[in-house]
Image (tube, rainbow, N blue to C red):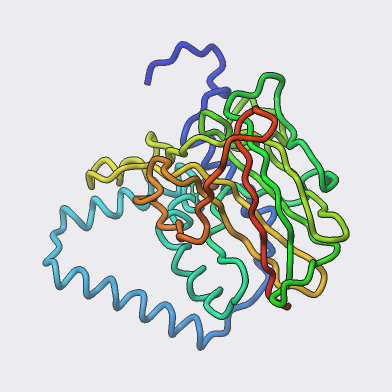
Amino acid sequence: MTSTSTEATAEATAAASGASATERFQRDKQITATVSQERVSTLATDLLTAVHDVVRRHRATYEEYNALKAWLIRVGEDGEWPLFLDVWVEHVLEEVVNSSREGTKGTIEGPYYVPRAPSLPADADLPHREGERGTPLLFQGQVRDLDGRPVPAATIEVWHADDEGYYSQFAPGIPEWNLRASVVADGDGTFRIRTIQPAPYQIPTDGACGALITAAGWHAWRPAHLHLKVSAPGSRTITTQLYFAGGQHVDDDIAQAVKPELVLTPQPAADGSGHEVTYDFVLDPA
Ligand code: MBD
Ligand code: FE
């Protein structure tokens, strides 16, 4: 690969963002829950049986088997297990785990959440660089319960890509908490968050996931999205994303994580700068 950059470490490579996501996962996710032997056996047996079925049904060849082996090895080398699983598997987990919810629809967390972002008050500008590019967006609303009552002491964690589709802490050269915060809603659950509209996100194309996409003739895009985690004492935390009506790839998200209830239609802002949109969250009881 050729590059004009003098600092190899400052490139936004798949391996660099994959390594960050892998390291983050290992550090931040409490992987302490033990899965019972019975459950491991059930899940592993059915998973392997599904693989056996694919081999038989499609009469797979040794060339294909070895291509798979080489590719799986590369997924690990590129640190892309978090990316691979979150793009192609997590949406079904989310569907199963959140099927009993009545409030705001959830969707996948993805690989780029970072816990413990700096706390900001209910009326907040997300941390951003001077001259941060992108259309200004005022995102406001209220957190309520299933009966429509305001939820006190709600926290809205928000994180999103910049106008070029890069996430802080996973691409080089971006301030640590850029476009990330934990916003503490007012006593009546209301919040007003000023940020910029993110760009559609292209998953890294130079790593193993990109190689699969190219080999299969798929595309690598997610629609522009805001990531959110909304929590409050006594409520079930919701992890979700919001999208923008009419945006590219809203109808063909590679991660299959768009739901119609999660598509925003921002309007021109009252003060003439950019867009504004109101979205109310409804939390299920814990
Ligand atoms: C993302 O930004 C994302 O949200 C998911 C699910 C996968 C890859 C990148
Ligand atoms: Fe994302």
Left or right, 239 with respect to 194, comes to left
Residue 39 location, x and y as percent? Answer: 51, 84
Q: Whole-percent x and y of residue 38?
A: 51, 88
The residue drawn where x is 65% and y is 28% is 272
Considering only vertical position in the picture, is 61 above or below 219?
Answer: below
- In the picture, the quarter occupied by the C terminus is bottom right
90 w.r.t. 247: above or below: below
In the image: residue 233, left or right of residue 14? right
| x then y, percent, for residue 95 | 48, 71
| 272, 200: nearer the viewer | 272
Residue at the farthest front position: 270
Q: Nearer the viewer, residue 172 or 8?
A: 172
Would you say 193 lies left or right of 168 here?
right
Quadrant into which the N terminus falls? top left
Question: Residue at position x 29%, y 75% from top?
Answer: 50
Q: Residue at x 43, y 62 (%)?
A: 89
Residue situated furthest bottom in the rendering: 38
Percent x, y of residue 114 = 68, 48
Is residue 163 rendered to the left or right of residue 138? left
| Among the 4 quarters of the image, the one containing residue 33 | bottom right
Q: Nearer the viewer, residue 67 or 106?
A: 106
Residue appearing at x 70%, y 41% in the figure: 180
